[in-house]
Structure formats: structure tokens, C-alpha cells
Amino acid sequence: MANELNRNQAAFATRAVHVGQEPDPLTGAVIPPVYHATTFVQDGIGRSKGFDYSRSGNPTRNMLELCLADLEGAETAHVFPSGLSAAATLLEALPAGSSILAHHDLYGGVYRLLADVRPVTAGHRINFVDFSDIDALKQAVAAHRPSLLWFETPSNPTLRIVDLSAVARIGNEVNAITVCDSTFSSPAGQRPIEHGIHVVVHSATKMLNGHSDLLGGVVAVSATAPAGLAERIKYLQNALGAVMSPTDCALLHRSLKTLEIRSARQSASALSLATSLQRRADELRLDRVVYPGLESHPQHALAARQMFNFGCVISIELAGDIVRVERVLTATRYFRFAVSLGSVESLIQHPASLTHAAVPEDRRSATGIGPQLIRLSIGLEDPVDLEQDLVQALKIQS
Ligand code: PLP
């Protein structure tokens, strides 16, 4: 597959449009065809055109993986049928009995995989600590001697920011693989590998695809990751059979072409909405507005240092009871009451009963996910319409 453009030659937005998207040499079609074939004719024993069976390799998937690796600054990227299957496949790279240290503040499904599934199926020993507290992280690393450090930044839904360079340094000191779930940002918003992180994972279902019409996951491996890890992920993708379909690969690749512009616009709208909500907090009966772009965010300076924009997610904590919370969730017109984030349409959801229901209640409240917390994902609608929509819902009296 021709790929004459790489990250040394052009800016992010240009590469997002062109990498892995050379015109079809046969017909001149500007967009390459989608290869739905499951099997490929062989020229002789040990002689092929680079493909034999679609689980092991597919031209449409290869084009997408090339583009994603380029945008993340990774050596390789592999795509999976969901974010969780990407995470599960990556964890298969760890020997049985390995010690894993994870951020205490993770998406509920990843928490379930780490805390409930892997200890039973692979004897993995899992411990949790607040990765935004670097001293606590160092102590936990010394105590548990982990082979792998797993964290999200910004975290879901409390939007804590983890210092990418500090975690990379700590991981390297003890030869642990560092894994950043960058779902809340995407490579248009932050690139953890540029800060020394070994592996980036994504739920491509979110910002990367951005249109709420496919599930997907990504594992991108840095050239500085422990030797053999990138090859191992490719091996495991085939061995476990967790591959994205060609149709979804083509859809996701199309979405990457608008990633930078979506990310910039969604983040700008989120910043303006968060600023306004914070200013009107008393009038709208809000106890807290959390957004990394606000100066009131405890890690605003760190976010400004390591992110290109602050992302599309805002969390708000409502004053009042659960009846009010439910009324707000169901009273908006443009914000749809549905899980997920990062899409062109704005969404509103309730982490305690939905995305983080798999997290035990005591752990949820320790990380700040109470029943009053609402998560907003800001889409591409006009920000004035979005603000009016939310404000009318927040102003409804009981
Ligand atoms: N990581 C994060 C931060 C998420 O928010 C999610 C899903 O919401 C996942 C991973 C899992 O991804 P998927 O739903 O695509 O399996």
C-alpha cells in the first residue's frame, strides 16, 4: 500500500486526510475501495500479494491502522471491534500472575475487566491508586512492583488529569509498560507517546469515530515500548480474532479526516459552555462544574501543558435530590439522554447508574461519582442552542 506521506512531512490535519488513502492505482478512484474479501488468491506456496485471510490482514484495515499509527506518533496501531476488546487483547500480552497498577478513576467497563475478569482468568494482581498524586503513585509502584501501569487522562467522568511525562518516567524506572487510555481526548487533543508513554488505547467508538455509528478500539504502540510488544499485539489480534470489520474500518477512516476540526470545535464549545455554567452556578443550582479548561480545575495548568485542547466532556454536580437529576436528564431537547461521548450530537448521561454502574458504590463515591453527577458530551450543534437547552432544563422547578 503506497504511503508517501508521513508525520515528518506534513501537519496533523493533512496527514489525517491523506495517510493510507492513496488513490486506487487500478481506477484512479480518489477514495480507495473497501476490501470486503475474507480470503485472497495465492500465487504459489509462500507467494501472495501480502494477504491470505482477512483475520490476519485486510487492505482496508491496514490503511486505517497506518493512519492511526501516524496520527498517534506510534510505531504500529491495531484496530479492534470495541474499546474493551482492544483493552482485553492488550492485557493478554501480560504473563499470568503479573502485577498491574491502575488509576483509581477508570471507565466502569475497564474497571470490571481489570478488577473482576483478569484476576480470575489470568491470575493478574490488580491494585488501584490515584495517578494524579505522583507521590502516591511512586509509593504504590514500590509496594506492588507492577509490570504494567494503566490510566486514563482525562479520566471518565471526573476529568482528572494525569501527568503523562511523570508516569512515563516512573514506568521506565521499573521497566513497567505504561498504557494511557486516551479516549477522552484523541490524538487531535493530546499525544501521550510524545511524552514517553509506551501504549495508547482508545475506544474508537468515541472521539475518533465521532458519529455514534460504530464500535471500535485501538492499541497504538510506541517505538520506545519494550522490545517485541508491537509484534505481540499483531500476533494476539490474529490469534484471538478480535478484528474490526472492513466496513467499520472504512467508516472510521472517513471520520479521521474530520477529527481535528471536530475536536477543535467541540472543545471550543465545551469551554464556552463550562465557563457560562460556572458563572451562573448559583442561579442554575449547580454545586460543581468540572472541565479541564476552567482555571478552577485543580490541574488546569497541567492540562494546558500537555493537551492541545481540553476536550468535549463537562461534568456537573447538581444541587437538589435525585428527582431533580432525573428531570434534567430527560428535559433537554438537543442533549440526548444516552451514554457515550465524543460524537457530533450532544449527549447527557448519569455515570452512577450507567457508565460506572459496574464500579462498587464505595469506590464510586471515593472518586467523586455521586448520584448528583451528570456528564455532558458537547457535539457540533451551535453552542448558543446548547446553552439555552441546558439552562431551560436546569431551571425547571420541582
Ligand atoms: N475507555 C473509556 C475511557 C471509555 O469511556 C470506554 C467506553 O465508554 C471504553 C474504554 C470502552 O470502549 P467500548 O465501549 O468501545 O468497548
Image: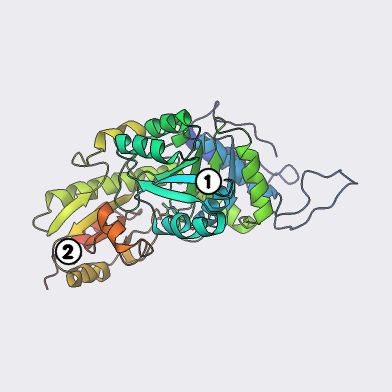
Considering only vertical position in the picture, is 299 above or below 88?
A: above
Q: State how far apart marks 1 and 2 are (Cα).
A: 47 Å
Q: Is residue 274 visible?
A: yes
Q: Is residue 387 left or right of residue 14?
A: left
Ligand 1 is located in which of the four quadrants? Answer: bottom left
| Closer-to-camera residue (228/312) | 228
What amino acid does circle 1 point to?
Answer: Ser
Identify the residue under disc 1. Answer: 98
Residue farthest toward the top in the current orientation of the protein: 8
Identify the residue under disc 2. Answer: 394
Image quarter (top left, top right, bottom left or bottom right) of the C terminus = bottom left
| Closer-to-camera residue (366/45) | 366
Identified at 76% across, 45% down, the residue is 26
Residue farthest toward the front in the current orientation of the protein: 143
Marked residue nearer the N-terminal end (1 or 2)? 1
Residue farthest toward the left in the current orientation of the protein: 282
Circle nearer the viewer, 1 or 2: 1
| Closer-to-camera residue (115/291) | 115
Identified at 53% across, 46% down, the residue is 98
